[in-house]
Image (spheres, grey):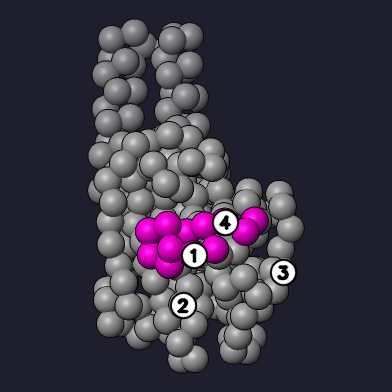
Amino acid sequence: MKIHPEGYKILSVSLLTLTLLNFALFSWAGRSLLLYTILIGSIVLASVLINFFRSPRRIFSSDTENLLVAPADGTIVVIEETFEEEWFREKRMQVSIFMSLFDAHVNWIPVNGKIIHNSHQNGRFMAAYLPKSSRENERSTVVIERENGEQILLRQVAGAMAKRIVTYSKENQICRINEQLGFIKFGSRIDLFLPLDTRIMVKMDEKVKGNKTIIARL
């Protein structure tokens, strides 16, 4: 299993700390119930961290014209018409994906185009599945303009445990499906704001895979 570069430092420190903790406990208490309990807990925690920072290799091989592909693994928690107040300042179709701790947290470019806006807003760290987290939580906003001038807004939203949003994309950069957009550490969500006439291809509570599931036809 390939590990994402964003996890190298955290995993190295965490695994070293757990190893030293168990070694010290063994030296102090020997083979005891406490040692085995801590050892099992350490293995579980290490497995969760390694699974979280996995970086699945996925290639979207179908025709990408007029398609919007899932930017992340997770569950569809919002499909509704809403007023987007930060960039468009008009009604848009919102589709949101909630990522649990057990989902891969790599974020992908969802549509072909050019990045015309990239910004970061500080905020709170409420649970990412709450509707108001899109407006009040720490977040990064990326706007992609397609060749026909149509604009798609993608917002990376931090969650209750997510303390760092990483966005690789830069303004004026040409972007394509199959490219990575960024990474969010420890539980989060992604909001997509699309034109009202977009044909949505997913349903509420549906599990989606980043760079695999077709979210909409534009």
Query: Which is more toward the observer, 4 or 97?
Result: 97
Secondary structure state at the residue bearing disc 3: loop
Which quadrant would residue 170 be assigned to in this image? bottom left
- Residue 82 — which label? 4
Query: Which is more toward the observer, 149 or 71?
Result: 149
**Percent from the top left, x then y, of residue 15?**
33, 38
- Residue 151 — which label? 2
Of the residues tagged 2 and 3, which is closer to the observer? Answer: 2
Q: Are marks 2 and 1 in contact (CB under 8 Å)?
A: no
The magenta-colored residue range is: 80-91
Sequence order check: which comes first, mark 2 or mark 1? 1
Q: Is residue 191 above or below residue 58?
A: above
C-alpha distance separating marks 4 and 2: 16 Å
Q: Image point 43% across, 67% down: which residue?
A: 88
The magenta stretch spans residue 156: no
Secondary structure state at the residue bearing disc 4: strand
Q: Which amino acid, mark 2?
A: Gln
Left or right: 11 in relation to 149: left
- The residue beneath circle 1 is 90
Q: Which amino acid, mark 1?
A: Glu
Sequence order check: which comes first, mark 2 or mark 3? 2
C-alpha distance separating marks 4 and 3: 18 Å
Q: Are marks 4 and 2 in contact (CB under 8 Å)?
A: no
Crowding at dot 1, Cα within 10 Å, few <14 / some 14-19 / many 20+, comes out as few
Crowding at dot 3, Cα within 10 Å, few <14 / some 14-19 / many 20+, comes out as few
- The residue beneath circle 3 is 201
- Residue 118 — which label? none
